[in-house]
Image: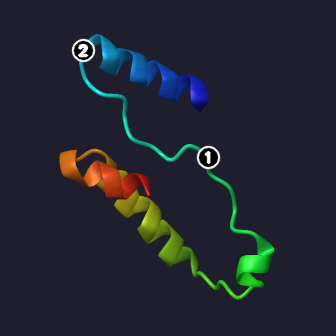
Amino acid sequence: MDSAAAAIDKKRREKGQEAACRKPDLRPVALAEHSRSIDLTPWQVLHAVARGYVLAGQGMGRGPAEH
């Protein structure tokens, strides 16, 4: 994953563009922060993933999709 991101950043620099904005580190939410009270249905997860996938390919939607 990191090598793919580095390759994308390198191509963007060669084109004179800024590096892509992305979160530096992704980790699961600590158990102390949610105490197993997060309930998600499979379709909620699929909806979030699909929405992020669609937005990631659309100009101004890339920033929110990465979060």
Residue 54 appears in the rendering: no
**Residue labelled with disc 2:** 15
The mark that comes first in sequence, 1 or 2, is: 2
Q: Is residue 5 above or below residue 39?
A: above
**Corner quadrant of residue 61:** bottom left
Relative depth, front residue between 49 and 8: 8
Residue at x 23% of width, y 16% of height:
16
As helix, strand or loop, the secondary structure at mark 1 comes to loop
Q: Quadrant of the N terminus?
A: top right
Relative depth, front residue between 18 and 1: 18
Amino acid type, callout 2: Lys
Q: Position of residue 12 (x, y in %)?
A: 32, 21
Residue at x 49% of width, y 77% of height:
44
Q: Residue furthest top?
A: 14
**Residue labelled with disc 1:** 25
Amino acid type, callout 1: Asp
